[in-house]
């Protein structure tokens, strides 16, 4: 487990959340915040996060939507412990279980959820240079293929439930192949650093057993202007509302949140 001196105390959602993170291990930035914003959960629904790390995505969602029943699965015990501590110190509900998504703990295998969310590792095995910190390396590089993350999430969904994943944009074809057999009503939302640039990230949302057509949503532009402006973050209005106020991100074409039925 992490010692107190190994941790930082970081603010999210404009300081509404205070989250402990390792100084030198895997540290989150904005990806889990955008992931949480894209989940159209309703009070009383059940949500599972695969690979919850320190719990940031689940806690951002809980801060926006009261009354959720939330669970997280995390492989690394030290990060699972952080997620529990972060939930407790923010007074938000999150049951954290330790285990591998390929062989989930029995209590999770017995449950189904309305939403499953995930921020899987971005880098395939053998791609690039390994991180010096083992926890960071495990969080960023696949030990379990991306298709297995998708399959595990779908198994834990009720029929008609929603799977929401954030991933690097170049992995979009892999996600669509993994989703195509058992889902429909798929929407992909590109996240673009600045207008006119290629997408760096993509949020993909799919409905288990859905029948709707694939939709490529208009991109979310994260920063104003063509170049970085000194020390100013210069976020777009929508990005700032999500990052600082916990606003919802409606990713379906036409601006509507995912409906309860097709």
Image (cartoon, rainbow, N blue to C red):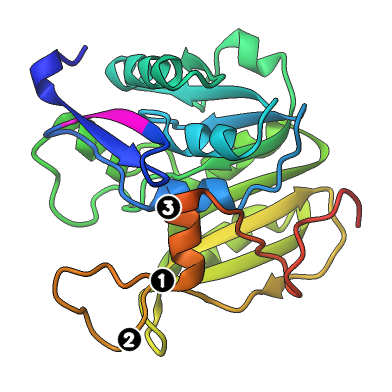
Q: Earlier in the sequence, mark 1 or mark 3?
A: 1
In the picture shown, does residue 65 fall above or below 227? above
Q: Which mark is residue 3?
A: none
Neighbour tally class for label 1: few under 14, some 14-19, many 20 plus, Cα within 10 Å: some
Placement of the C terminus among the 4 image quadrants: bottom right
Question: Under tag 3, what secondary structure?
Answer: helix
Magenta run includes residue 39 = no
Question: Under tag 1, what secondary structure?
Answer: loop
Residue drawn where x is 44% and y is 32% of the image: 51
**Label 1 with label 3: CB-CB less than 8 Å:** no
Q: Mark 3 points at which residue?
A: 244
- Tell me where residue 13 sits by quadrant: top left
Q: Residue 225 carries which label?
A: 2
Residue in front for this viewpoint, 154 or 61: 61
- Tell me where residue 176 sits by quadrant: bottom right
Q: Name the residue under label 1.
A: 222
Q: Can residue 100 be seen in this view?
A: no
Foreground mark, 2 or 3, reads 3
Residue drawn where x is 51% and y is 27% of the image: 102
Residue drawn where x is 49% and y is 51% of the image: 245
Residue bounds of the magenta highlight: 18-22
Gap between marks 1 and 3, in whole Å? 13 Å
């Amino acid at each position: 487990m992490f010692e107190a001196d190994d941790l930082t105390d970081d603010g999210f959602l404009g300081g509404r959340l205070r989250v402990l993170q390792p100084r030198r291990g895997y540290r989150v930035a904005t990806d889990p915040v955008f992931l949480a914003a894209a989940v159209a959960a309703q009070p009383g629904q059940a949500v599972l996060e695969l690979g919850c790390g320190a719990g940031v995505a689940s806690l951002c969602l809980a801060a926006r939507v009261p009354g959720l029943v939330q669970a997280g699965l995390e492989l690394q015990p030290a990060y699972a412990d952080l997620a529990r501590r972060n939930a407790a110190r923010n007074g938000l509900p999150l049951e954290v279980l330790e285990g591998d998504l390929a062989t989930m703990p029995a209590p999770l295998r017995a449950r189904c959820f309305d939403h499953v969310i995930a921020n899987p590792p971005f880098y395939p095995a053998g791609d690039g240079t390994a991180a010096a910190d083992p926890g960071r390396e495990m969080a960023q590089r696949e030990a379990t293929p991306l298709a297995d993350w998708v399959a595990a999430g779908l198994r834990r969904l009720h029929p008609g439930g929603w799977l929401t994943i954030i991933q690097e944009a170049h992995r979009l074809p892999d996600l669509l192949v993994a989703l195509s057999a058992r889902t429909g009503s798929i929407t992909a939302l590109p996240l673009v650093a600045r207008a006119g640039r290629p997408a760096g990230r993509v949020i993909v949302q799919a409905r288990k057993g859905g029948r709707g057509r694939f939709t490529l949503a208009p991109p979310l532009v994260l920063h104003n202007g063509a170049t970085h402006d000194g020390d100013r973050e210069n976020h777009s209005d929508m990005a700032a509302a999500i990052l600082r106020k916990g606003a919802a991100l409606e990713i379906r074409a036409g601006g509507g949140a995912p409906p309860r039925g097709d």
